[in-house]
Image (spheres, rainbow, N blue to C red):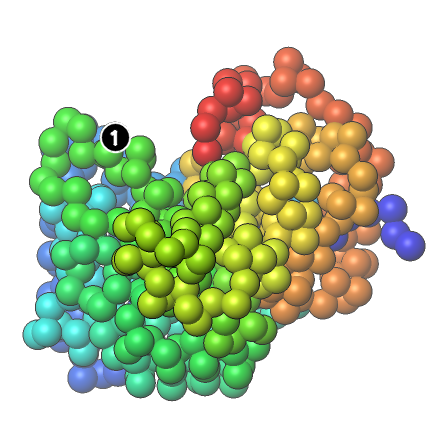
Amino acid sequence: MSEHHVVISADCHAGSDIRGYKPYLEKKYHEQFDQWVAQIEAAHQMMSERMGDESVLNVGVGGDPVADANRNWDLERRWSEQLADGVVAEVIFPNTQPPFAPVPSTMFEAPPLAIDNAELRFAGLRAHNRWLADFVAEAPLQRSGVVQVFLGDVEGSVRELEWARENNLRGGMLLPGAPPGSGFEPLYSPIYEPLWAACADLDFTVTHHSGGGTPDFGPYYPASMAMFMLEVTWWGHRALWHLMFSGVFERYPNLRFVNTETGTKWIVDTLDELDVFFERMKHANYGSEALFGRVATEQMTMKPSEYWKRQCAIGASFLRPIEGALRHQVGVDNIAWGSDYPHLEATYPYTREQLRLTFGGVDPDETTKMLTTNAARLYHFDVEALQPLADKWCPTKAEVFEFLDFREVPEDASKCPGLAPHTQLQRS
């Protein structure tokens, strides 16, 4: 048995430079693409001037700001940085703006559905998926790509999932949000049944990532970004109970579902609360819970916490020490650690320190589940094949077991919530 962990990040991001998507679009869309690029670049220039922050331009274009945008697509740089940081495999979510996404008035504006641009929107997402297939093919052992779908075209999205399976995008489906005002049916709508059936049939994990389900926070007010940061994870949490109480987990007991980068601590209290609501909705003879929830819970044979334990997980980006201490309440088999590379709040380049801070003193077998085997199960990695790479680059189990005091954390590492000393007191 190897002395080294096989460190898999269940949360990384990548995407093409905005103009790099053009070859992946059907030619009939090229002229419209050029026009869209000009609008996007003008919009980001305007936001940069309005916010007094040039980092808005440094996103490639679109997505979250990163220290250097080319980390999204520069194979050599990206891989050398992650190996040096002790990470040998990654689950890849999108990060740059796909073709034909609506021109934003702020960085946090939810893209509404418009009937006249639905075709273009889906064409842009398919272009990203085809770029991603090539990106994964450069290092198929180490990368698992998550597929984007379009809620406005369920049939087309099912075909896209089937295409992804044939092209080694084994990371499953990225479930978009459908917040009020988006124009999409809510996630508990029966219209999405073919998506759940397809993912179950294809052995695809369904992942809902924080940031993809927020409503429109309006024009740029001084508090707009603060509201986004205060509420973004809650909007991500909602997908869990939407699928749970609409019976998706009951009908598809082998379907896996993950909430990623939405925090970890929240699930403990949330499951307790959902269990209480479930009991009142299903078994009480009176009260508003029974009145409004009885029909939905009639089809549920398990408590929410039991569905959670059986088929759900947290994509635990930069897992904080206080969250790691709750691992038994969350479920050691239900946590998959992530670095969030290449975002500003990522553990890079202090991943070794972050692992020691959170997993120091933790049973190495439990740490192995959270760093390796859970992500491998959810996103189809071959751990045995990755081990030789891990033996060269990943920290040893003894190193991770050695507790790191906050006083040993480099000062500039505090950008990462999992490394900042004050996060011990934070709510998640």
Can you say whether 31 is above or below 351 in the image?
Answer: below
Q: Is residue 385 above or below residue 222?
A: below
The percent position of residue 312, horizontal first and vertical second, equals 55, 58
357 left or right of 4? left
Query: Is 302 situated left or right of 406 in this image?
Result: left
- In this rendering, does residue 11 appear at all? no
Question: Residue 309 location, x and y as percent?
Answer: 61, 56
Residue 362, quarter of picture: top right
Q: Nearer the viewer, residue 398 or 95?
A: 398
* Residue found at x 37% / y 56%: 285
- List the residue tagged with mark 1: 226
The reply, left or right, for residue 234 in relation to residue 202 is: left
Label 1 amino acid? Ala
- Up the image or down, 72 lies above or below 401; here it is below
Instruction: Name the residue located 33 percent from the left edge and 52 percent from the top edge.
Output: 286
Residue at 53% x, 40% y: name it: 268
Q: Is residue 314 visible?
A: yes
Q: Residue pushed farthest right?
A: 1
State the residue in front, 409 or 39. Answer: 409
Q: Nearer the viewer, residue 156 or 277?
A: 277
405, above or below 146, in the image: above
Residue 303 in picture, x, y percent from top left: 53, 57
